Amino acid sequence: MIYQKDHMLVFQYDDEKVFVEAWGKNGIRVRATKKNALRGEAYSALLPAEPMTADAIEIGENGDAKLVNGKITAEFKHNVLTFYNDKGEELIGESWRGGPLNYPVPHDPNLLAAREWRKKDNGYRVQCRFKAYEGEKIYGMGQHPETVFDRKGTTLELAPRNKQANIPFYVSSRGYGFLWNNPAIGRATFATNYTQWEADLTDEIDFWVTAGDTPREIERQYAEAGGKTPMMPDYAMGFWQCKLRYVTQDELLEVAREYYRRKVPVKVIIIDFCHWTKHGNWFLDPEYWPDPQAMVDELKSMGMEVVASVWPSMEPGSDNYKEMTEKGLLVHNNFGQHYGQQNTLTFVDTTNPEACKFLWEKIKKNYYSYGIRNFWLDCAEPEYWKPDFSQYSYYAGQAEMCGNLYPVEYSKMFYEGLRAEGEEMPISLTRCAYAGSQRYGTLLWSGDIHSRWDVLRDQIPLGQNVAMSGLPWWNTDIGGFMMGVHEDPDFRELLIRWFEWGTFCPVMRLHGIREGKATPPFTPPNEIWSYGEENCVIMENHIRLREKMFPYIKRTMQEAHETGDPVIRPMFYEFPNDEKAWNLPYQYMFGSDLLVAPVLEAGARSVEAYLPKGESWIDIRDGKEYAGGQTVTLPAPIESIPVLRRKSAEVLF
């Protein structure tokens, strides 16, 4: 049975109902359920929206139907949905679960089953299958250790982990964008013979499709439907100094003073984790941080903002453990016990509004009151010791059903708390994210990665896929987080190349735990002068280059805020009609005008880069001009990174 209900097209067969409606510009939202009604917007990554009137809804006598919204049309035929663009070209279509055997719905040979429901607990294990298309390329899906540029041919886990941020939105080379609007733990498979989405536990299928003539049009339509990033504050566009970890107030201040003496512009300096007395005591240990107000005042006088690390972890014996336990504000397992990290820690339940209110009041009193207005939201997945999502529950529901909500609710807590205090542009450095995180000032980083050349190489396609997922703010630990041997010349070369590339990332942040000489309890140094004078000069020059680029970076951040355009842009984003631009994982556009070709191999002193046709290109280092439509070899001495600007662009710096 198929019929129109208000603004929606509804298909019902037995106990399954499928609702199709216009949603956003050139977009269509599809929801299916076996319950009596839709669950509402509690789990949705799309912004709440007033019901839209479709351009057309047509129901045929044979039970077929279609709904039109701008450039996209959804057509129902035999219980299968297919989406077309305004030229009548097929974009994506559901596929019956029987595949070539063409298994029908039982008792009705005219109906095919594209959606599979298997009863489980208080919901269902769901599979939703779509056709595969020869030659299709898929970009986005957030941050995954599988650092394949084109996601076609991969299976991706839809779960939050260290180094993995599930953002289930992608842009297809066929001219559409797709959001799997479901925070359940699951998988996405982009096989050569089908595409399949799985949710381990859910009560609803929910996805959104949008059509566009270019990746830019698609990305902007997703930004309108899912929310845009705030404007980045000016100071965050400069250089961030960090290491694991500054142990005392005096140590941090001495580093800041040395940068200031050298007249090297540091805009942000970070107090990393374990500055507290116990996990769950959200304050600076007074033994090591005796006067936070004086520290913050001095840093601000040198032009530096402070970022403080906050973990959602909680250990028995901490000041807030008893009260939060009694009020039910912590994560627990399905056996009625706390479930945590390393068998000793549990976590604040960020899906519980009362838990968020409790934690924010502590942050406000113990950090914000001193002028610390930006935070590092580490362990934001959160990092369970045994991450079996079937074993624990949140206020919002079982983790299998809503586990991907945790990181976005964590960012939302700080964003809304800071906004309530009058901060107009909050920014939080965060180790995990989900669809919608961009709305809350989330600066994702790629997690606790190793200091190796292959890992540096992986970051380039990874960052581009995060960008195509609708999250413009992204960065890495410059130099990698782990296993960088401080005195090793090979590591120093890696650090320099990473630093040069980091100059052309949305945020430029030096961080890591180095292996080298240090006086306990301090950790080895990680300041630019600690790697030798020659390397210090190279890094200082790039910090100053970043400062010279400020007007351009600010313009690019404004574009991200106003339109949803990413900061890191795959080459096809700016040059969609150049076929070669769709296959360039190791170069990208930084904003609209700068082509960046990082050095990604030890000992390399040149880089090959493809220059898209239709433009001439000028090396920003020496002014040499290159014609577009060719692959060129660019010099890459140790002191610089190849970056070219469009000749048609204004002189940037």
Image: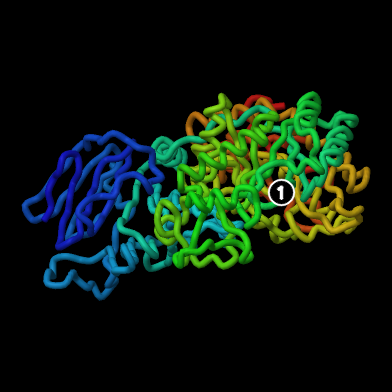
Q: Which residue lies under the disc numbered 1? A: 273
Residue 228 lies, with reference to residue 344, above or below; the image says above
When asked about the image quadrant of residue 258, the answer is: top right
Q: Is residue 312 visible?
A: yes
User: Amino acid type of disc 1?
Assistant: Phe
Q: Give percent across and percent down for residue 104.
A: 19, 70
Viewer-side residue, 334 vs 153: 334
Q: Please identify the quadrant where the C terminus is shown.
A: top right
Residue 145 lies, with reference to residue 280, above or below; the image says below
Q: Is residue 152 visible?
A: no
Q: Element under label 1?
A: loop
Colouring scheme, one of rainbow, by chain, secondary structure, one colour = rainbow
Q: Give percent across and percent down for residue 529.
A: 89, 42
Left or right of 199, for residue 573:
right
When asked about the image quadrant of residue 455, the answer is: bottom right
Q: Give percent across and percent down for residue 587.
A: 64, 48
Q: Measuring 71% from the left and 44% from the top, which residue is drawn there?
A: 502
Q: Give percent across and percent down for residue 642.
A: 73, 43
- Seen as rendered, the residue at the extreme bottom is 101
Viewer-side residue, 427 vs 179: 427
Q: Measuring 23% from the left and 57% from the top, which residue is drawn there?
A: 35
Q: Measuring 37% from the left and 66% from the top, which residue is drawn there?
A: 194
When asked about the image quadrant of residue 46, the answer is: top left
Label 1 CA crowd tier, 10 Å (few <14, some 14–19, many 20+): some
Q: Please identify the quadrant where the N terminus is shown.
A: bottom left
Left or right of 21, for residue 293:
right
Residue 617 lies, with reference to residue 459, above or below; the image says above
Left or right of 38, for residue 459:
right
